[in-house]
Image: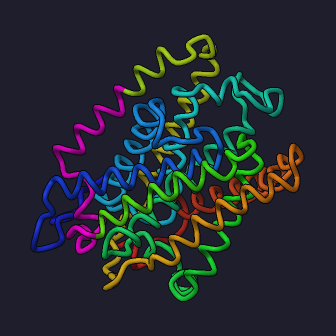
Amino acid sequence: MQEQEGSIAMSRQTPPLRLKMGFWVLLGMLSTAFAEVVAGATKFPFFEPWGILVVTPLYSLHILVLATILVRYRRLSWPGLLFAGALFGLYEGYLTKVLWYPEWAQNLAVAGEVRWLHVVLLVLWWHPLLAFIIPLLIGETTLTRSRSVLGTFSPKWRARLTGHTGRYALILALVCGMLASGNALLGLTALWSPLANGLFLLAVIALWRRTRGPQYTLAELLPGRTAFAVLVVALVGMYIVLGTYLLPDRLPGVMGHLLVLGLYAVFVYLLVRVPAATLSDDTEATVVSWRWLAMFVAVFSVTTLVVKVILGPMSIATLFPNWIAACTVGVFIYAMAAWRTLYATPTSRDLA
């Protein structure tokens, strides 16, 4: 990969380190909230020691390292987002061991010690979308003046998302609520988990908007060379520590290791092969409206509780259509992205 010339420091001013670090924290919190709270895996990640010391840093390091790679090496495109998101999701192998020994659906689609249903759901759908692409899109449009992630979408979808922000925020909140109700949220936790975490995020975003942070672009706020190197070392260290000491009895045999390492190699190769693309120079004078953010938190929280109250234990049934859709759509989208990356003729934007 060739590093983008002149690159990321596109503005005449460099944001101070304290502002950049504040943005890193917020971006990591968005990733954690969408991935963990919606899944019900960590119900209060910003209020309990495990969430603060392990879960939030894990998501923060992944989204910051991968987003910086996409921007610095000019791979910020739709295929680039997908392949980086898949690399994100592969932490469910060596860190949590879920791709080898999951807590649910243990006997489905097993081959070579790998649970392939979980690979499709977690590596090709959940983490790319909820832990990476959506937090990055919302983080940039809410916290910065640039729209480079939005620029990876087709003109038709950019127009839809910018012209009907409230509609898509409402749809996303409803979907997140249904997913959360079908996962591990029980009783009033179904309300307090999304509400408490959402309100805390809104409070931190309010503090951010009182700073000069929103005047900078995503590229300017991402880590520079030194900080990026530190974050990579921290991420590698987390893999070593958690990979060694978290559920070590669930590590697989040789075949399980080879298959998951093979998945890493495939997605790294595809990411390297993504045609270089310039960052979108589209910017907006204003950030996303407070009413959309507040509406999202409210609808997400209420939907989670209402679906849980109405369906009770049967709320888990809401997950099955999502599993089917995720398996079908995820495989199709990744196949198309791989074909486009390896065989399609580069567009003028790819060559820019």
Task: Assess whether residue 231 is covered by the magenta stretch.
Answer: yes
Place of residue 156 in the rendered image (x, y in percent of width and height, measured from the top left): 57, 85
Instruction: Give the residue drawn at x 69%, y 49%.
Output: 190
Q: Is residue 239 above or below residue 136?
A: above
Q: Is the magenta stretch mostly helix, strand or loop?
A: helix
Place of residue 22 in the rendered image (x, y in percent of width and height, measured from the top left): 27, 54
Asked if residue 209 lies left or right of residue 333, the reply is: left
Q: Is residue 122 above or below residue 278?
A: above
Asked if residue 322 lies left or right of residue 121, the reply is: right
Instruction: Give the residue drawn at x 46%, y 43%.
Output: 46
Q: Based on the displayed image, in which of its 4 quarters is residue 15 positioned? A: bottom left
Asked if residue 229 lies left or right of residue 57, the reply is: left
Choose between 351 and 178: the one closer to the eye.
178
Q: In this view, does 310 lie above or below 226?
A: below
Choose between 333 and 182: the one closer to the eye.
182
Q: What stretch is highlighted in magenta?
A: 210-237
Instruction: Give the residue drawn at x 69%, y 44%.
Output: 120
